[in-house]
Amino acid sequence: MNGLKYEEGNEDPKHVITGLCRQFYQLGWVTGTGGGISIRENGKWYIAPSGVQKERIHVDDIFIVDEATEVVEKSPNKRTLKMSACYPLFRLTFHLRDAGACIHTHSIHAVLATLISADTFVVTHLEMIKGIEGHGYRDRLEVPIIENTPHEEELEASMRE
């Protein structure tokens, strides 16, 4: 990941998000301005902007939200940027799941996984499952599938179910 390995005390979440955005773009996991990434660390939420090509996001483009007050620290960047349209979903994921990060993707692989599964995508015996806290290779990981809508904010009710 070009020196952007994310380890506690090693990298600022803003650098991790920009590095992941570039890497995800190269892998085809995000396209253009679609999708979003957020990280939760030390009482702050770090959120990529909306409407910016993922491979072109700069560190100064990242929004920081205080978890307790939800006050937004705006980017010092001179461009007019908006926080990710996924922000309500990220906030809900942090609150409901106590997540440390959230990735919203429109990759062809994610879309195909939702088409072959009903309400839940289930995997087991995959090495990558170990990257999810509390899970191991032989565990069964279930990911709920939420039907997409034209606007991200319309997904909030489905996520609460």
Image: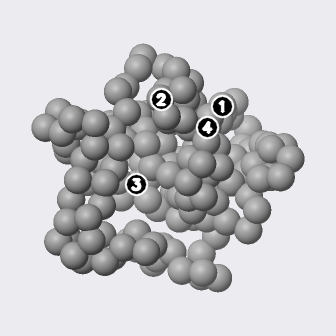
The alpha-carbon separation of the residues under discs 1 and 4 comes to 10 Å
The alpha-carbon separation of the residues under discs 1 and 3 comes to 19 Å
Give the residue at mark 4. 87
Please report the residue visible at 50 percent of the width from the left and 52 percent of the height from the top: 102
Give the residue at mark 3. 22
Instruction: Give the image's coloring scheme.
Output: one colour
Give the residue at mark 1. 82
Please report the residue visible at 64 percent of the width from the left and 70 percent of the height from the top: 12
Q: Is residue 107 visible?
A: no
Tell me: residue 156, above or below residue 113.
Answer: above
Give the residue at mark 2. 158
| Towards the viewer: 144 or 106 | 144
Give yes or no for contact between labels 4 and 2 (Cβ–Cβ under 8 Å).
no
Which of pointers 1 and 4 indicates the residue nearer the eye?
4
Tell me: residue 155, above or below residue 137.
Answer: above
Can you give x and y, in whole percent of width and height, for residue 80 in the image?
Answer: 69, 30
Count the marks. 4
